[in-house]
Amino acid sequence: MLGKMMDRQLTLDLILERGGRYFPEKEIVWRAESGVHRYAYADFFRRTKQLANALKKLGVEAGERVATFCWNHAQHLELYFAIPITGAVLHTVNLRLFAEQIVYIFNHAEDRILFLDRSLFPLLAPLLGQLPRLKTIVLTGEGETPPAPAGKALLDYEALIQDQPAVYDYPALEERTALGLCYTSGTTGEPKGVLYSHRSTVIHSLAACLPAVVNLAETDSVLPAVPMFHANAWGLPYSCVLVGAKLVFPGRQLDPASLIELMASEEVTFSAGVPTIWAGILQLLDQKPGQLPRLKRMGLGGSAPPRSLFEGFRERHGIEVFQGWGMTETSPAGTHGHVKSSLPQSGPAHYDIRTSQGIPAPLVEVKGLDEQGKEIPWDGKTMGHLVVRGPWIASGYFNNPSASEALLTPDGWMRTGDMITINAHGYIKITDRAKDLIKSGGEWISSVDMENTLMGHPKVAEAAVIAVPDPKWQERPLAVIVPKKDHSVTAAELRDYLLARMAKWQVPDRFEFMTEIPKTSVGKFDKKVLRAKLT
Ligand code: ADP
């Protein structure tokens, strides 16, 4: 027997209408070259509907991918909503990728219309000749207007929307309609397109507001430091509009000092990004504490944050840091490292839990599988392959049958490519990406663990550990070290430090010193580049 409840389709208009109608006074702030700008949700609501009408006028069709190549700002937020409510697909292109990957992504997605920041025009201009399907470019943001490139129409965003009606007639969309397309950054091969649906996005946005996930409320002022071209800025723009939180977009200035300045002036209460950004912020706060009295919580993810960040922010500045594990394929909320009330709330045991990736978000299921496909025990020791399942987890990739087939287990769980252990409380710990694990003499060494230990050394700013081939042991770890500014550190010092904290056979034989570790397009250590350089 079926229940007798309405089947209201879970589509994005629900989020837009709630934010726009009930929080018209709330602010949206963005930093541009000319300074900090702001408008109200009421303006955002009106302009988004004008933009949706403009898209219709441009002939945008249902299912068509419409690309954005933009930093984090209010026009990008308008695009986040306007494109999907027409039934088209918001395709956020990662502007930090290599040229060949960008060309591949545009051509694979078959974008016809592109919204492009003026400041990014020079970056894309040399590639436009390789994008035959792209016909119309709409310029966003500030700066010079370039001449129209050969074979493309060039429009201005503000001119496009200004005369459009502020009333929008939403088409009735089925909730499984595609909403967004985001290609994984390709640290693991050719970029693959993850295709979010209205339903997955609405449920993900709702869940993200829960205390067990990101914990967002109308009273928050939120600065997404994660780019809007990466996994929908972890869904924060949608969740914030859903609850009516103030949004603060940093534009392209993502250096620690600029972020601190904006967070202070806009009284930011929550921010999120990859760990590399926050190490710099912690250093500046340590030099001058008290700069961010309103900042209460921070969400870190994308790679394992070092313990020193959790401890430093909480103990010295009263800022609670938690980490989330996720992937573009998981929208990205997967697991979160909040510490349950029955577990230690302070001391080393507390930080042991914080440095794990936590328990799954509500509605997400996770398990670890051994080589035979059997579930691993919750003993905190046995390592297994992490697989996940849930309403906002990818079931395949856009126009890519072979990668789609490889993604799922025969019984429908998604393979993540990550290796984990699970402790007695169900907290998972990512020991590595399967391909980054180091196998030395038949024993596994976790590069993530060793990196975190090394980054706990007072003179180390960054540490990345990779496997190098070894005739005797098969593989040995090699540590790449970036000392803190104005510090120097020797291999002998680091070896002694590690010997006090891990087994002798795990300690690297080789240390390399660099001024910076190469990073991927989204700010993670790029081990592919390190391997090519050092092995
Ligand atoms: P890419 O696959 O291009 O790196 P993603 O941003 O989707 O793009 O990366 C997802 C991966 O990042 C995960 O599979 C995992 O290896 C890693 N990751 C994400 N969050 C964490 C975390 N909190 N701790 C450790 N690793 C993480």
Image (cartoon, rainbow, N blue to C red):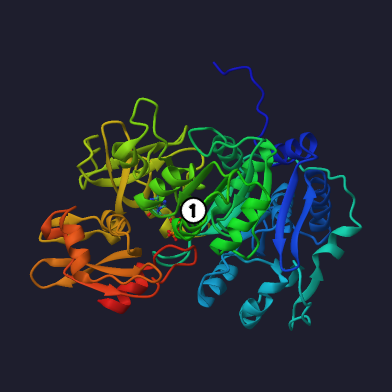
In the rendered view, does 417 fall on the left or right side of 320? Answer: left
List x then y, in percent, for residue 426. Answer: 32, 33
List x then y, in percent, for residue 61. Answer: 73, 56
Look at mark 1 in the image and give the residue it sits on. Answer: 328
**Camera-nearest residue between 151 and 161:** 161
What is the secondary structure assignment of the residue under circle 1? helix
Displayed quadrant of residue 68: bottom right
Q: Is residue 382 at all visible to an observer of this figure?
A: yes
In the rendered view, does 80 fall on the left or right side of 279? Answer: right
Q: Is residue 178 above or below residue 155?
A: above
- State which image quarter holds ligand 1: bottom left
List x then y, in percent, for residue 48. Answer: 78, 50
**Camera-nearest residue between 63 and 261:** 261
In the rendered view, does 206 fall on the left or right side of 356? Answer: right
Q: For the N terminus, which image quadrant?
A: top right
Q: Is mark 1 within 8 Å of ligand 1?
A: yes
List x then y, in percent, for residue 95. Answer: 58, 68
Name the amino acid type tagged 1. Thr
Q: Is residue 498 above or below residue 514?
A: above
**Residue plotted at (60% across, 46% down):** 236
Q: Is residue 11 at all visible to an observer of this figure?
A: no
**Residue plotted at (64% across, 63% down):** 71
Displayed quadrant of residue 261: bottom right
**Residue plotted at (37% across, 41% down):** 354
